[in-house]
Amino acid sequence: MNGWHGRLLNVDLTHRRTWPETLPAEWLQTYLGGRGLGIRLMRDYYQLDPYSAEIPLIFAVGPLCGTPAPTAARLSVVSRSPLTATIYDCSAGGRFAWRLKAAGFDAVKIVGQSSAPVVLKITPQGGELLPAEKLWGSTVGATVAQLDSQGSVAAIGPAGENRVRFANIMMGEGNSVGRGGLGAVMGAKQLKALLVAGNLKVEITDRERFDEARRDILRLFKASPVIYGDLGIAEYGTPALVDLMTQRRMAPTENFRKTIFAAADQYSGPAIRRQYQPKNHGCYGCPIQCKKSTQDGTPLPEYETVNHFGALNGISDLRSIINSNNLCNQLGMDTITAAASLSAWGEIRGRFPRAEEVGPLLEKIALRSGKGDLLAEGAQRLSRQLGKPGLSMSVKGLELPAYDPRGAYGMALAYCTSNRGGCHLRAYPISHEILRKPVPTDRFDFAGKARIIKISEDCNAAIDSLVACKFSFFGASLEEYAELLTATTGIEYSPQKLKEIGERIYLTERFYNLQNGFSAADDQLPSRFFNEAGSSGDGIEVPPIDRLRFDEELQKYYRIRGLDEQGFFVADNWLEQQP
Amino acid sequence: MIRQLRKYADKLQLDGSALPQQTAILAQDDRLLSFGAEALLPLGQAVIERLNVVSLVVAAPPLPLLEILLRRLAEDAQTLIPQDTETRTFLHDIPLVRKEEFSIENPQRIVELLGQRKGVLVEEVGILATGSVTVEQAYINYSSVYHALFVKLLLMLLVDAPPTAIELDLLQPLLKQLQQPIPLRLDDLYRGPLLGKTAILEAIDQVGKRTVELKLVDSFFGNISCRLAEQVFISQSAASLDALPGCIDLVPNDNSSTAGITASSELIAHRAIFAQTAASVILHGHPKFTVIFSLLCEETACKISDCWKDCDKIRYLGTVPVVAGEVGAGGIAKNVPPVIGDGIAVVYGHGVFATGNDDFRQPLATMITLENWCRREYLHRLTNRK
Ligand SMILES: [Zn+2]
């Protein structure tokens, strides 16, 4: 059985112990790796408090990692989110995942709490805990610089140490395990960084079949205007979307009071290119290279980040936006939630922060000093505390990214059905509602969206378990990735089988959340989107979302998922029946 | 959604890729919906219920293409690998299911194969194709499989064993059609020069509809553009040429906006053609007989195995150049502009790029003329095979 090492590294920080364990082949074959394997490994722990000593923090790679499969040098980190209280996973690229696989492990499961800061070093010989008092308090960049001569690094910054609820775990190359605050879970364990080194290879069972699938995928990338087009993400990175979202009048502006920002052209893809002549970067072995940096290597922001530090806070200054992005990376926290928290706070107090105020505020958040302590709680908690819960633009406590739900009804529904809260990547309907991939759908119509969302959630859960990058699927499909997986492992996988795997993963997550007290009441958008119109104009009408139609489609979604009207499982013992 | 089913059932008749009385379309919303031939619904239902998809088309092509093909294939052949671009890029291969491999009670073999590929050929049924996002997607996949099957079989009849009397008899309706050229009706089309946005959008809409009506493109879209000063109007990616209003992007040449990220994957090729020629409009379609002839390479002792990518020769259909090149960033943009000076060029296994200096009459006319030449030539060669 190629593709997996079949090994898990256990780490108990309380007792300073590390030991390898064999992973059952059945789990690997039915949960693949990444998100799926992590979710399975959480089965006995999902009800624990995210800051409890016993909760596991799991790093899991997938069966394609370590092979030349395009965009597959990724891993997922899984635990429970201190921001949303949902089960949580996040996928990240870079070089770390590939190194972890080369160290001979499919997953690392970290439990316990160290009495003093430590670094976990992983090699094919196993795990080793190194003292890290001197690194505690350091930025991500400084930490990485101290360690990366010995291997690839994943580290937290001050935000994680101070339990900012949206603290990231940052890969040494700048990629982030973002959104849900798993950096705070790592900080609570006093684990400053992971360091991995190894050179074990992943064998491919059928090389010829693998190469053919790989060629098919690269051909599809070339045929995809979003990936390799003149105006696509290989050229401009994801800020290529700024102009499009402006034209579609769905760019969240001033805490979602408006959906268009007149000065967005100051930080659009072309504006960034004009001012910075960016260099291309990307994850290990990725042919797309969508990450951009300035000539001196400072990472340039993604679309979500430019919009949220830009339009969402009424800021047009690109220099300030890049600075905010850089600060978040160095302090180790999520850009979307940081910016959305500032924006919610801005609306509540009647004034959005000025460009020059953002940097100092971000530093306060990471240190939880002054006003930063409240902002470090995220938009939902701060809005409640300030008596304006309706002004948190979030679902299940996760702040919405840069696609206004009034401009894409599938996106509206998908924000609510996502198991980790208001995230665009779980079903990614922007792909068909806006980018016309694989085929276009009517963004202002709910018809048919429930099933599309369900299928996409299943597909993406499988993709997150392979682990491949979502951007690949602007060109390729599960068809080609199933081929890669089959060729690698020697076990026949079809797209249909992958969707079944994804469905099981999705339902497991939902089951965990429901057991933790979530219900249909949490599958709802903030009322602003049902009561207030977006910014209509230029022949595009952006009305409030019709609540009846939304609820109707949500009910359809529950039926298609086999859930009852309240979104609950029909069988209480559903989980016990799963492998 | 039932409206959608009807719409695409109608489209399958209009584009001539399915028999009206043997077309069924099914879709799953929170319940199963279906439209079309009663006889096909039980199989369709048995299949779609076992798949995690939105839509399914079950239909029979208007000619007994599949029947003829199966007789020509080895009995144990399990897949068909046509050489057209759609198969190469999107379908990869087309699985075959023989009649003894399934029943309505046990459609497992079909389910398994449709769990892997976008469409399959099923003996005595026709083509089954699915969509995982929309009803349109199953229609598109059906139409792509049909296009690939048509091109593959008709090419086989030219290069493999000559057609038997029975085959010729079965193909009579097609051969009769080929005796009638595609009409060169252009007078009602917008007359250039196209100088303003309104005129351009209308002209594009008109020629798009005509291209579909004349079956010069399959459902795999094609694309259309018009240059205006330093900008290009171009149809969007995955936009059906008979439904272009609202689906045209305006892309500035200096890339001062990236809103055109939704433009056709052939934007790169269109831009290169505009940059290297005096053309002001481009029409790109996939006329079937031109595609067949583009694949008919009579080169001997050629060492190239990946013709789509590696062939650097220029061949000719009459006087029209044929070059290789893959979709999007894959080579068309490099290979087509240098040879399209006379207003038309063919891409191996793919289709035609035709240009005009004033309006779309010229490219439509050259595309029709070439396709008519290929149709005549095909008929001539086929009926003279020994
Ligand atoms: Zn084409």
Image (cartoon, grey):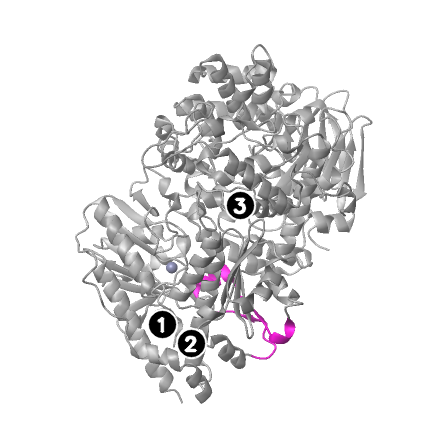
Q: Secondary structure at mark 2?
A: helix
Ligand 1 quadrant assignment: bottom left
Q: Is residue A185 magenta?
A: no
What's the amino acid at mark 1?
Answer: Phe
Badge nearest the viewer, 1 or 3: 1
The boundaries of the magenta stretch are B74-102
Q: Which residue is labeled 2 in the image?
A: B154
Q: Are marks 2 and 1 in contact (CB under 8 Å)?
A: yes
**Residue A78's image quarter?**
top right
Instruction: Find residue A243 and name its label.
Output: none
Q: Disc 2 sits on a residue from what chain?
A: B
Q: Could you give the CA–CA distance between mark 2 and mark 1, rounded to whole angstroms?
A: 9 Å
Disc 3, ligand 1: is the CB inside 8 Å? no
**Mark 2 or mark 1, which has the lower sequence index?**
2
Q: Which residue is labeled 3 in the image?
A: A286
Given residues A284 and A514, the one toward you in this image is A514
Badge nearest the viewer, 2 or 3: 2
Label 3 crowd bin: few (<14), some (14–19), many (20+), radius 10 Å: some
What's the amino acid at mark 3?
Answer: Cys
> From the viewer's perspective, is B239 left or right of A118?
left
**Residue B86's image quarter?**
bottom left
Residue B17: image x %, image y %?
A: 43, 68
